[in-house]
Amino acid sequence: MAYSDNPRKIYGKVEVIYADEELSRDITTEESGNSEISHPTEVYHLPSVPTVKACTMDGNATMDGSFQMMDDSVLCGWWSGKLSDNNGVFADKPYIELKFTNRPIIYWKVIGDSKLNQYPMDFTVDYKRNGVVVKTEKIEGNTDLECVLEPRIADITSVRLTIAKWSIPNACAKILRFYERLYEIYEGNALQSFEVGEELCSVEGNYNINSDTMTVSIYNEGRKFDKGYLRTLMLLDRKLLPFIGVDNNGKVEYTALGTFYSDEWSIEQDSQWVKCSATDRLMRLQAKMYIGFPLTYYATLYEIAEDILQKTGHSSDEYIISDMLKDIVVDLAFLPKMAAWDALQEIANAGLCKIFVDRQNRICINNEDDVAAVSPIVIHPGNAFGYTSNVSLTEFANSISVEYSDVSVSDDVIDVTDTEVRLDAGQSVDMTIDYTSEISDASAVTNNASVRITNFQSGVNSCTCTVTNTSAIQQTGIITVSGYAIEIKSRKITKRDEESIEYYGVAEYSHPASELVQSHEHAEYIATVLLKKMQAGQGSITATWRGNPELEIGLAYDCIDRFGEKQRLLCEYSKFSYDGGLKQETRGRKI
């Protein structure tokens, strides 16, 4: 069966992750001991496969070319500090214990080293509540590399693995995973309905940052959400993954619709259904502060965008930035301290970008000149319920104004803060200091030799640093930050379509200003793109249709109206509504 079949059977499911390695930032570990190279915190992070087939000096490695030497850069999990005897038995049983916030445990995994084919044979797992063992599972004669336990127990604050016998003699314990995320899947009668909205840009087609949303209604079986084992996990920031599926030869094949994080739970005592609303990871950036981009000569928008994402805790596999931004160079690039969301909006304004989260949970920064892939999906009168063409007043303009900044650095050195700090003997504190003016080449000093500044990182209007009292008595010091004053003059260009003005009169549009636009050429490029795009006034087309989750935002697709006219559109927005069947609302802009 395909999504285009009529009739068809549509399946929906929502996976709710209440605790995993991303959400559980409170986990700590305690071990009986460690080998020289051992990474106990890796036991609750994915992947659970070692980087190398480790060469060891315990007699279990050979010179056949398959073993590799280790260093601290490898992923190896926890390696205990003691070796087993000739029978694999530990005289002094090694253990590792994970401690965390109160949570239920449904499943728990113990995984050994798959490349060395080593694993625990005899071991116990103790589940504790505030330090008291409330359940113990004892395993003897295990022969599996991966052992899955099902304790199904609530209100646990720590779990300890104690190993009595190892699968290989004269070897230390090697545990790659001792953890399992806490999740439940809601489908069938446990899932009443859900809606998912994904958006590339606003309805006006502006260049901006957009956060996707979802809502879901799930069954409160046994009152587990307000009286049962999930009651302590009705928190913000739980992870929700919605799916739409169709039967293919007896097997349901699901399409993921993204990753969302809960921002509201509604649990009514007189209802069997729990409602949850959630947003994608971009919304978190409104609460994350970006220290700013220090004044840098000839930086690209790509470098600045990457700096924003990396300084707000994103790894390189969590974002995709258009290569087109490598060609946009800012002569004297800088950004002041601001919310990370606002910093990305500066990138969108200066680079004509649309910023969104894709279904792989990656932050995407797309440039206007990026070529959209074409989807084979066609919306036509045979699968559409409604069709609306819309042109708003903000989508037509024949006179475009763009501001740009003339930035220079003064020869004058100015002081931008005199901050007093009082520290006890040996005390060290991390500080964020705001400036009274924007500067470049910042430096920081104190008037007290016993008050030392380290880890100094400065933007143009704030800095972070560590301040330490190196003496044995309380000290007071004044931190002075100084640098060269940054001077900014605003200028503006206007680009007009005189022929259009003669016919229709003047319709003006002013592009949002950004201090990352610093040349007449850059401003003219923006104005030219906008004038070409907005003088047509073609607007967008919204269709309500049977739906297919394989049509993602950012893809081009064909849409045929009831009169047989076909247009190629860029998918800017889709809302999926599932209640046992599927309906989709899709908005596309004419290409």
Image: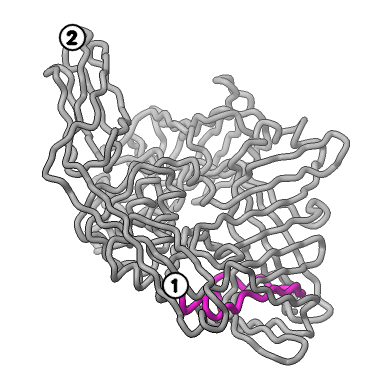
Q: Is residue 250 above or below residue 577?
A: below
Label 2 amino acid? Ala
Label 1 amino acid? Glu
Q: Secondary structure at mark 2?
A: loop
Residue 59 seen in the figure: no
The image quadrant that residue 561 belongs to is: bottom right
Judging depth in this view, the residue of 20 and 388 nearest the camera is 388
Q: Is residue 534 above or below residue 131?
A: below
Q: x%, y% of residue 59?
A: 27, 48
Q: x%, y% of residue 562?
A: 77, 87
Report crowding for label 1: few under 14, some 14 to 19, many 20 or more residues within 10 A (C-alpha): some
Please indicate whether residue 19 sits to the left or right of residue 400 in the image.
right
The question of residue 531 being in magenta is answered with yes
Residue designated by label 1: 368
At a point 71% along the width and 64% down the height, the residue shown is 576
Which disc is residue 472 wearing? 2
Q: x%, y% of residue 156?
A: 61, 29
Image quadrant in which the C terminus is located = bottom right
Closer to the chain start, of discs 2 and 1, is: 1
Report crowding for label 2: few under 14, some 14 to 19, many 20 or more residues within 10 A (C-alpha): few
The question of residue 538 being in magenta is answered with yes
Image quadrant in which the N terminus is located = bottom right
Residue extending farthest to the right is 270
Residue 405 seen in the figure: yes
Judging depth in this view, the residue of 330 and 284 nearest the camera is 330
User: How many marks on residues?
Assistant: 2
Judging depth in this view, the residue of 505 and 478 nearest the camera is 505
Which portion, as a residue range, is magenta?
530-556
